[in-house]
Amino acid sequence: MSQMQAPQGAMKSVLHEQRAFPPHADFVAKTRIDAARLDAMRAEAAADPVGFWAELARKHLAWQTPFTQALDDSAAPNYRWFVDGRTNASVNCLDRHLGTRGDKPAIRFEGEGGDVRIWTYRELHAEVCRLANGLKSLGIAKGDRVVIYMPHSPEAVIAMQACARIGAIHSVVFGGFSSSSLRDRVIDAGARLVITADGGWRAGNIVELKKAVDEALSSGCEAVGKVIVFKRTAQAVGWKQGRDLWWHELLATQSAQCEPEWVEAEHPLFLLYTSGSTGKPKGVQHATGGYLLNATVTSLWVFDYQDSDVFWCTADVGWITGHSYVAYGPLSNGVTMMIYEGAPTVPDAGRFWKICQDHGVTIFYTAPTAIRALMKLGEEWPAKYDLSRLRLLGSVGEPINPEAWIWYHRVIGKEKLPIIDTWWQTETGAAMISPLPGAMPAKPGSCTQALPGIFVDVVDEAGVSIPSQEASGYLVITHPWPSMLRTVWGDNDRYVKTYFGQFADRQWTDEHGTRRMLYVAGDSVHRDADGYHWILGRVDDVLNVSGHRLGTMEVESALVSHPRVAEAAVVGRPHEVKGEAVFAFVVCKGPRPEGEEAASLAKELREHVGKQIGAIAKPDDVRFADNLPKTRSGKIMRRLLRSIAKGEEITQDISTLENPGIVAQLQGR
Ligand code: WTA
């Protein structure tokens, strides 16, 4: 692992973590998948990996035209699944429940201000059809891209489902992204229409979404002909006649029936932009059939859904977690889910626990950053509420440190509830490595083992599998899976290079005749003696700030777009609550600012980054220097900057630097 970045803060404590927590007998007694069933599933998958998925696809999805070919690997790594089948995601999520669960709540919604609304499957279906018809009336058809920039709300899910119903490709942009990030995504996707809201409530404030859309569309987005605006916050908004339409006015005249567009399984369901180590965020493209299959079965396996469950995934629909475990997975399985619009601490630190109590939440799935934040606020908050309906807890998005895991287990889980720590990515579409809660012991900080049908490995610098059971190295996925991304929108070379380029020489045809290649996840991992996986962090220049992915390059380009900045280098440093914080080293044009000037410029730069990207990207630390540490060939020594940001002793050899004298200044001395 010589060239890998030193794994993040928690590594040392994680690797000494020995505790194992077997599932409680009460849970095991009712579980869908126990240890024996898990073994059997793994054996089936190993004997015939492609056949395993084909059988699940027949069993768990409704097809208009059944597929005859499960996997087409002829253009690997551009794999195609269920190629000649036709289906529709919204039919799977809605229509197929109407006969048996039409009056069952699909969504329980609570706004930040406390307003509650419950949508049954029948009501949700009707509203999706109305919007789908509305989209058609505006000329949106199969294959058109629709950008959704909305508050976390039932309407965001309705918008996604309505696109899916007519075969339009949605691209949800997180409402916390700035107008400039929104514009980049609208342009890259070639969107014809934007669905937004006047605003959303967050931490007592209105997030002015419509205003940001107006700014974004002010230049370079000529393909966008219409903007549909959902009225949520009801403040006055700008209006462009002929382009802007109110959601309620559009839907008022539409039929509540809409014939679905049956699409080929490979038809793109959505694009979701995510950060990489180079360039602008890339449009990760997912295919209808394969994506929906993994979203559906992983929901069922990992969350062990029962018909009576109320499932709450706290992720915003703007992220992949909100796609797979809000917009698609729960609905495809016909469970009831909770959606909460706002911040976890409004009006106080008990809000999440009050929602669990008031809505009878049984399964709670959140990010470690939220757990750490709530942990800091004290045990008295969860103690105020009746959490007795909870039966399963989950974690996603970043490594969970054992301390937070134990708190979650003890204070929220009352030492009884299983915790599933799910490892996956925007690109994988659904959970890949995770415990099955009734089938195996959990270890605090480990995402445990690959799900049935998913094959992962730990490889060295050359992509060679490390033979010993205990191993540290690059995490790779060695067999194609249905919900893998299909490509990067508009840039297939980038897809091939980013995910399959590093170990491109290691490809082979397996005993089933499948062409295999190594999908490189970009994470480093440790596999322990029990075959459990411990994610150590990214190996590339991607940060994980509060569970959100951020490219250091993106933040650097935002900084250098400020007139005072000549050069910038951004690294991550461990942060108690956020996991990682953004640390920016900045070289200014002209003299290096000091004292008050430095403080005020740092503030200005933070705001500037917020405007360019979004509040999540604002640097926590800005340090000004006369120069950056460079090798004689002009390369910035990032490893050194990472050590400095962490406040570590410098052990690197700085004699090879062109400017070794700069180190003390970078350290703030
Ligand atoms: C990290 C989020 C440790 C990892 C679903 C991955 C995790 C990146 C975990 C993807 C976990 C996600 N334990 N690390 N359980 N889950 N990660 O695309 O570094 O937003 O590569 O998908 O988050 O982030 P993304």
Image: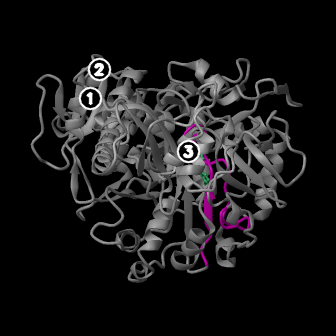
Residue 364: give its label. Answer: none
Label 2 CB less than 8 angstroms from ligand 1 = no
Callout 3: SS: helix
> Which residue, given by chain and number where applicable, does mark 3 sit on?
663
Residue type marked 2: Cys
Residue type marked 3: Val
Mark toward the start of the polypeptide (3 vs 1): 1
Q: Which mark is in front, 3 or 2?
A: 3
> Which residue, given by chain and number where applicable, does mark 2 sit on?
221
The region drawn magenta spans: 416-445
Q: Gap in Å between the C-alphas at discs 3 and 1?
A: 40 Å
Label 1 CB less than 8 angstroms from ligand 1 = no
Q: Gap in Å between the C-alphas at discs 3 and 2?
A: 44 Å
Pointers 2 and 1 in contact (C-beta within 8 Å): yes
Callout 2: SS: loop
Q: Is residue 419 above or below residue 150?
A: below
Residue at (89, 31) in percent of width and height: 511
**Residue at the outermost front position:** 661
Q: Is residue 129 above or below residue 166?
A: below
Q: Quadrant of the N terminus?
A: top right
Residue 216: give its label. Answer: 1
